[in-house]
Amino acid sequence: MKVRRPLAACVLTAMMAASVFYVSAPLAGGQTPSPANAIANSPNPDLIGTLTKELSITPAQATGGAGSLFKLAKSTLSPADFGKVADAVPGMNGLLKAAPKTKSSSPLDSLGSSFSGSAGGLASVASSFKSLGLSPAMAQKFAPILTQYVQAKGGSSVAALLEGAFK
């Protein structure tokens, strides 16, 4: 008798296998990548280090999650306003490129329109966060860290633009 596993279990198994490969795959010279190396090689080591430490996530999750939220901001803000946010965040292009590619027809993508307030905007990145192995609720933990970072680098008016994009 053949046992059928739910699709979610298959995807989870594949993600776990990929993460084990990433952690154990040797680099040139026989070294394995360390979280410190991954942070140092990220588009914005300062921001990725903060996210990794405060949220207890991997550098890849931090980079992809930040990229997903900045991608949301880019789609929500005017080009001029997003330019102000981008100017405050070194490595913005790399962060945006790190955002997971998602299918716009995903039921999780349409979930955002059914929420009001900050949950609505942040819910629109649910599929991106799930593809990173993060719960969609983690977006609500990323948002204040990103906003605080932007405030420190670009001032309160730029941080307010970003905060507004998450609503």
Image: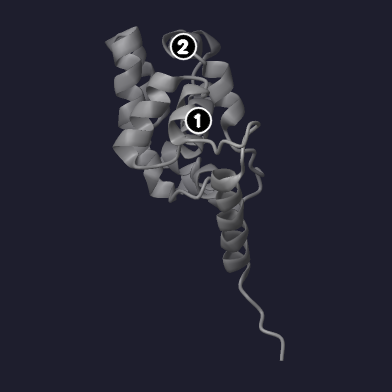
What is the residue that sits farthest to the front in this orientation?
29
Q: In the rendered image, which residue does mark 2 sit on? A: 81
Q: Which mark is residue 71?
A: none
Q: In the rendered image, which residue does mark 1 sit on? A: 38
The Cα atoms of the two marked residues, 1 and 2, are separated by 30 Å
The way the protein has been coloured in the rendering is one colour
Res 150 → quadrant: top left
Res 160 → quadrant: top left
What is the residue that sits farthest to the bottom in this orientation?
1
Q: Nearer the viewer, mark 1 or mark 2?
A: 1
Residue type, numbered disc 2: Asp
* 26 horizontally vs 85: left or right: right
Which one is nearer the viewer's eye here, 50 or 73?
50
Q: Mark 1 or mark 2, which has the lower sequence index?
A: 1
Residue type, numbered disc 1: Ala
- Residue 88 point in image, percent of width and height: 41, 10
Element on which disc 1 rests: helix
Determine crowd level at label 1: few under 14, some 14-19, many 20+ residues with C-alpha closer than 10 A: some
Determine crowd level at label 2: few under 14, some 14-19, many 20+ residues with C-alpha closer than 10 A: some
- Residue 5 point in image, percent of width and height: 63, 75
* 73 horizontally vs 17: left or right: left
Q: Is residue 78 visible?
A: yes
Which one is nearer the viewer's eye here, 6 or 43?
43
- Residue 65 point in image, percent of width and height: 48, 36
Q: Residue at x 33, y 23 (%)?
A: 147
Instruction: Locate the N terminus by quadrant.
Output: bottom right
